[in-house]
Image (cartoon, grey):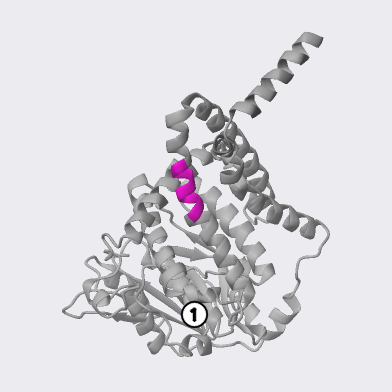
Amino acid sequence: MLFALVDFRHLIEGQFATRALWEWILFFMPVFIFGEFPRYIFPAVFLLIAKVADRLPHDEREKTTFFATTPSVSVLLVGYNEEASVANAIRSLLELEYPNLEIIVIDDNSEDRMYEEARPFADRGQVKLYRNSAATGRSGRPTASNMALCLSSGDYIVSVDADTSFDRDMLFHMIGPFYDPKVGAVAGNIKVRNLGASVWTRLQAVEYALSITIWKQWLGLLGMGMQVSGAFGAFRREALLSFGAWDPELAEDADLTLKIKKVGWKIVFEPAAIAMTNAPETWRVLRGQRFRWDKGGFRTYFRKHADILKFWQYDWRNAFEISMEFFFTVFLTFVYALYLVLMLWYYPRLLIFVWCLAYLIYVGVTLFCFSISLVFSERRSQELALLPTVFLFPGYKALFRWVRFGALMLEFFRINYQEGYLPESAWRNTKKW
C-alpha cells in the first residue's frame, strides 16, 4: 500500500514536472468552456427559493386597478404566407373578449390565401384587414409592423406572430405591468404548441423552458432584460413613437428592445402572459432560423448598439448583460472550436473522456434546471413528458455551437450579408452595420 502511494505521488509529481503551462490550460479548458453552467444554475435556484419563500414580486392588485380602466389595446398581427394559421390566431385573439381591443391584420403581399382566410373576420367587423399589394412585393416584417402601428389607435400595442394562440387571460397579464409609468415594453412567455410534431420541437420546448421561463424571469427581476420577442411582446405606444418604432433589421425585435432601453424605458418579463407557438419541425428549417438569429443578434448587439457598453451614459446593467452575452455566445464559441482542434491534434483519447464527462454534467444541470422550470409552469403535466428529451439536449446544444460558429464567421467577414428574411426593397432602405 505504501509503495502504491509512493508510486502515485511520483506519477503526479512527474505530470506536473513534465507538463507545460499551456497543456494544463488545455486539460482544464472544459471547466472554462462549460463555466456557463453557474450562469443558469444560480438563477434557477434563486427563483425556486424565492417562490417557496413567497418572495417573488406580487403586483396583481396594481394590475387589476390599471386593467379596470380598460386601456385601449391594439394587437398587430403581421404575416407573410400564413394561410394555414392566420384564422386560428384571429379566433384565439377574439376569445380574449376585451371591450377596448382592436385587431390589425396585415397581409404582407402573400403568395398564398392568407388574405382570403382572414377576410371573413374583417367582413364581420371583428378585425381590420389590410393587404400590401405593392408591385415591389412584400415589405418585410419590420416595415409591415410600422404600417400596422400607423393604422392602429391603441395606447398599448401587442405584436404577435400569425402562428400563435393565447391563454384567455393573456391581455390582463400582458397589459397589466403598464400600471408602472416607467415600463415601456413587456416580454411575454412563449411555449411550444406542436410538441408532438418531432424530436426537434420537443428539444425546443426544453430550450424555451430554460431560456424563457427561467432565464428571462431572472433577467426581469434584475432589470436586465434585453429582448422582447417579436412573436409576442407588448409596447407602450409613446415608447415606440419616441424613436420611430421598427427598423428593417435581421433581429428587429432585439433592435427594438435595445432602442427602448436606451431612451430610458423599463422592460419587464411577464411569465403569466402565455402564447403558444408552432416551432420549426425539421432540422433544415430550425437551422436556418437559428443561423439568422445568430447573425442578426451579433449585428444588433455588437455593431449597431455597441455603444450601450458606455455604462456611464446608459444603465450599467445593460453594459454588464451585453458583455456577458459577448463572452458566452461569441468568445466561447471560438474558444471551443480552438480547444477541439488542439485536443484532436494532441490528446484525442483524452477528448473522448472529456466529452463523456461533459455530457453527464450537462444532462445533470439541464435536468436540474428543467425540473425547477416545471415548478413555474401552468402546463406541468404536458411538460413533464419532456424529461426524457433532456438526455438529448447536450447534443442539440452542441449542434448549435457550430451553427453559431458558421453564422459568426460569415458575419465577421460580411459574407452573404444580405439575408432573404428581408426583401430587396427593405435592404436598400436600411443602414448597413
Dominant SS type (magenta): helix
Magenta segment includes 358: no
Locate residue 300, reporting x and y percent. 43, 70
Most extreme residue toward the right, as rendered? 53
Residue in front for this viewpoint, 168 or 259: 259
Q: Nearer the viewer, residue 336 or 222?
A: 336
Residue toward you, 399 or 371? 399
Position of residue 227 measured from the top left corner of the image (x, y, whole percent): 52, 69
- What is the number of callouts on the image? 1
Residue shown at 58% from the left, 53% from the top:
209
Q: Position of residue 211 (x, y in %)?
A: 57, 56
Residue 235, horizontal then vertical, whole percent: 53, 80
Of 18 and 422, nearer the camera is 18
State the quadrant of the N terminus: top right
Q: Which residue is mark 1?
A: 259
For residue 148, say whether it is visible: yes
- Mark 1: amino acid: Lys
Q: Which quadrant holds residue 2?
A: top right
Q: Is residue 333 above or below residue 237?
A: above
Q: Is residue 90 visible?
A: no
- Quarter of the figure with the C terminus: bottom left
Question: Does residue 407 appear left or right of residue 31 in this picture?
Answer: left
- Within 10 Å of the Cα at label 1, are there few (<14), some (14-19), or many (20+) other Cα atoms? many
Q: Residue drawn at (59%, 45%), measured in percent from left and top?
A: 32
